[in-house]
Image: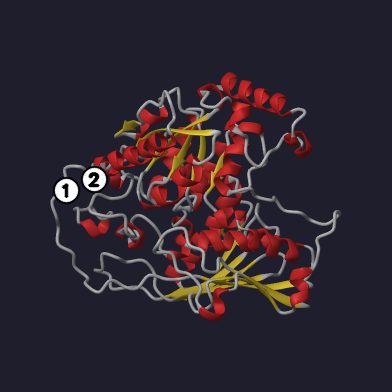
Amino acid sequence: MGNKETGRRKFIKNSLKGTAGAALMGIPSIVPAKVLGKYSPSNRINVGVIGVGRIARDWDIPGTIKHDVARVLAVSDLDSKRMEAGKKLVDDYYIKKGQTGYNSTKTYPDYEELLADKDIDAIILATPDHWHVLPAIQAVRAGKHIYMEKPASLCISEGRILSDEVMKSGKVLQVGSQQRSMPQFKKACELVRNGRIGKLHTIYVGLPVDKAEESTVEKVMPVPANLNFEKWLGATPYVPYTEKLVHPQHDYSRPGWLRCEQFGAGMITGWGSHHFDIANWGMGTENTGPIEISGAADWPDAKALWDVHGNFKTETVFANGVKVLASNEYPNGVKFVGSEGWIFVTRGNYSVTASDPVSKGNNSKALDASDPKILSSVIGPNEIHLIDSKGHHLDWLNSIMIGEKNIAPIEAGHRACSICLLNHTVMKLKRKLYWDPVAERFKNDDEANSMLVRAQRWPYQIEPGFNIRTTVQS
């Protein structure tokens, strides 16, 4: 695969000489089909999709398949109905485009078989949160590049292992932190980092929350014949099946697992991974972490199936003195406050899926400031310039194909996710915690440090040599 990839990069760069692309130092916004050869497989990135649910169908497959440099070659899902529907989605796209010589999309009930496919160069990992780290590690070991949905992990120790593994491999892993590819977030962070609001001292992060489940008891149901439920549970404890625990069997509405602590941490990671990432981007703290965390949250009844946190407030303090205050009571978005003004940035009315919260009424403005002159300020050539995205999935493809810098690398994703998980820990323990961002351990708190790992059910543990407990305690 390495020779194949190197050959493609050389082919593209050489083909761009003398074209408009040369003016961009060999980095086009998209590599045109006429350069690649209309349907030449040797000049494309062959992509496999692992997890073909709501986010893959609504966002990741459409965001990737539209680019000529990519060919979605295979899909995998532990729900055979979703896998076949994913195959049809991809097949129908290529048939509609009238691509001659098109071969039907491959299907793999087990993702390990997809990773073993030598024709596949890269994967989209759009699985539930508890199925991110293990397949991502296996993918880079198999020589695949990865686009992985956030959050980076469900415990900080596993996120560290994944980031180290990816960096050691030399493969591209781009996290689905697509707000980095939305122009208002880039502009807000550039303005903050270049001092347009003076000295930054406070950041407000507003997140939505899930409502507590009305019924605390859910009846056990037979496992659908199309679902490999035992493997779907992965490393988490075995529990009886009920549909609200997994995903709907008849549509692609918001799945129940998002509201179960067994498989996720609730909105603190669900949306927190996006907004804390922007806070880090604006502060320039993408490769470090905070030093102090405090806060609390409301929790549903202990018997509730949907048991993630409810209303919450937290305060996270960084070594630079900046405080990051997070709560569901703040407007959904990120507000940077400095000595000379403030900037507020959000998605506005944009949403990735139908269930995403959007701003309404007076809050629909995607970018706002205490003074309009702040937003009209021009970033000079000698000031800090962040990556100018051409599209989140396209940036990933360009990183693979021609070495363009990854706009959302795994270390930044891990650090943003770590803030979410630190907040989650303090919401559980309800006391101030002190964090060492270099050692990635709590200071003098054994109970908090015990929460840096999750129990792993056989045979879905991370392999020997990457023992989580040993890594955390070293």
Q: Residue at x 48, y 40 (%)?
A: 65
What type is the residue that disc 1 sits on? Val
In what element is the residue under mark 1? Answer: loop
Q: Is residue 242 visible to us here?
A: yes
| Quadrant into which the C terminus falls | top right
Q: Is residue 290 visible to us here?
A: no
- The front one of 226 and 42 is 42
Residue 346 locus on image (x, y percent): 58, 68
Q: Which residue is drawn at 62% across and 35% down?
A: 31
Identify the residue under disc 1. 223
Looking at the image, is 231 positioned above or below residue 314? above
Q: Within the image, what quadrant is residue 197 found in?
A: bottom right
Earlier in the chain: of badge 1 and badge 2, it is 1
- The front one of 388 and 291 is 388
Q: Is residue 86 left or right of residue 143?
A: left
Q: Answer yes or no: do the residues labelled 1 and 2 have beta carbons within 8 Å? A: yes
Q: Residue at x 36, y 59 (%)?
A: 258
What type is the residue that disc 2 sits on? Phe
Circle 2 crowding by C-alpha within 10 Å: few under 14, some 14–19, many from 20: some
Residue 409 locus on image (x, y percent): 60, 46
What's the mark number on residue 229? 2
